[in-house]
Image (cartoon, rainbow, N blue to C red):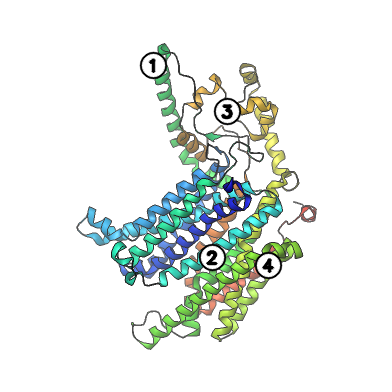
Amino acid sequence: MLFHSRKIQLLLVNSLTFGLEVCLAAGITYVPPLLLEVGVEEKFMTMVLGIGPVLGLVFVPLIGSASDHWHSSYGRRRPFIWMLCLGVLLSLFVIPHASSLASLFALNTRPLEIAFLILGIGLLDFCGQVCFTPLEALLSDLFQEPDNCRQAFSLYAFMISLGGCIGYLLPAIDWGGSFLAPYLGGQETCLFSLLAVIFLGCVLATLFVTEEAATQADVLDGPVLKDAPSKPSPPACCSCQLSRSSCLLQARHMMQALRNLCTLLPRLHSLYCRIPKVIRRLFVAELCSWMALMTFMLFYTDFVGEGLYHGVPRAKPGTDARRHYDEGVRMGSLGLFLQCITSIFFSTIMDRMVKQFGTRAVYLASVVFFPMAAFVMCLSHSVVVVTISAALTGFTFSALQILPYTLASLYHHEKQVFLHKYKSKEEEDAARLDKKSAFSKGLLSSQKLPYQNGHAGSLFSSSSSSSSPPAASSALCVSSSCDVSLMMMVGEPDSVPPGRGICLDLAILDSAFLLSQVVPSLFMGSIVQFTQSVTAYMVSAAGFGLVAIYFATKVVFDKSDMVKYSV
């Protein structure tokens, strides 16, 4: 009964949010020195750090769509969360032991050590960032009412900021000289072992989350991905024939899935193209806002080290130029740490601010505030003023972690208002499907088809929909959940478009965050090289912020905006 409390459930879910952010902040912060130590050049190092976001852009919508249609005894979200958490744990082992793993397979360990290190970094960045999508969907499932959802995502943003603070501080501690060193090894091994212990504890907390797997009012009745239901044992005389038919069906399903892998990119394109207008407007505003914020966060320490302290990163260690740069980097890290502290503060009062001023006012104020702070950093040469401005951007960071997700939850909570056009289209698809399959209804009588459109399910009684179809669906039930999930993710050529779930739309919003990391990494280096000034970082961030203000005014916040923008 203790774990069934809403507050306890909220803490259990967000404990994993904290664990993920600690691992990402500490791991990714410590990774660049490791890459440079093994001989990776700086221009290739930035490419390695972009592997995770690029893979995330491809797989986040697919995982989100699959999660929306997955049914199991553990719910829809946690199987995907646990699978991605396993990848994070594996990366926490591979990164500090890359040299040892390489020595097991080759005499010349350096190339293989680099390969293992890149594998671990890509796995950590990809699994860690993608895991937030089903985690956000789980929060939305458990706390569907707008007020409860806003409170849930306020704690979510609080845990992200707190995890970032801890993650930034852990690498600064000399673990090689601590009492753990004799048991765990050097600095890298101690750090990543501690991260693994923290993260494993956070993952175990999700075992006590009471995800509503059976009672799903907002669950789609469409293509269901689930474990094969138990069937009565067949007669002995039929077991051989059933075994052969099962094997043939398994092979046919696998061949179909492999053929449909070729259609992965077109299906990914269709997922993005069939975005409701309200989600599309929110996505564009999120993309511009995150590009402004990530341009600032990715290059702020370099801006302080070169622009304010006039240091030279390529200078030899021990020289004044290198010492000034290192001091600037430490001061820049302090600014980012203070940003996390500010974000924690605003996360705790965000719910009160929204109740007092409204979602529109708070969201627009956060977006407007960032370019103002960025322009101050461009014009000021005072370290104190720049550090204070950097710290205050935590307001924008906190708002972007909370309000877009609560808006997406609001859209799905009131689908008849915000997603009515998309719903009508689905009903038309369902009607066309009913016409095409009219001849099969006589054969199946009142039994529900195992793969049908979400809104077509309303044509059948609740009792028939809750029971598993017997002989009519036995052909599909013999396949494993992995086969079915693979077919769902890559699609079937004649399958009906599935209903739209919230995890897919949250995945689209998360794609904005991932894309915001890729674009600055590709172009900012060339822009700075062209202008010969690191101030271009902050000017670009302010420019993205101004564009974000325009698109933020086009976001749908309430029912009146549907009429105003003719959505």
Residue topped by disc 4: 549
Question: Disc 2 or 3, which lies upstream in sequence?
Answer: 2
In this view, the residue in front, 55 or 411, is 411
Which of disc 4 and disc 3 is earlier in sequence? 3
Mark 2 neighbour density, 10 Å: few (under 14) some (14–19) many (20 or more): many
Q: 272 or 464: which is nearer to us?
A: 464
> Looking at the picture, which amino acid does disc 3 mark?
Pro
Residue wearing tag 3: 450
- The percent coordinates of residue 135 (x first, y second) are 55, 51
Q: Closer to the N terminus: mark 3 or mark 1?
A: 1
What's the CA distance linking mark 3 and mark 4? 46 Å
Give the foreground label among 2 and 1: 2
Label 2: which residue?
162
Front label number (4 vs 1): 1
Q: Disc 1 designates what residue? A: 240
Q: Amino acid at mark 2?
A: Leu
- Label 1 environment density (alpha carbons within 10 Å; few <14, some 14–19, many ≥20): few
Q: What is the x, y in percent for residue 99?
A: 27, 60
Q: Is residue 203 left or right of residue 509?
A: left
- The kind of secondary structure element at disc 4 is helix
Q: CA distance from mark 2 to mark 3?
A: 45 Å
At label 4, counting other C-alpha atoms closer than 10 Å, the crowd grade (few under 14, some 14-19, many 20 or more) is many
CB under 8 Å between discs 4 and 2: no
Q: Residue at x 49, y 43 (%)?
A: 79
Are the residues flagged by discs 2 and 1 in contact, CB closer than 8 Å? no
> What amino acid is labelled 4 in the image?
Ile
Nearer-N-terminus badge (4/2): 2
Q: Tell me whether the residue at label 3 lies in contact with that at label 1, contact meaning CB atoms closer than 8 angstroms.
A: no
* Residue 551 appears in view: no
In the picture, residue 329 is in which quadrant? bottom left
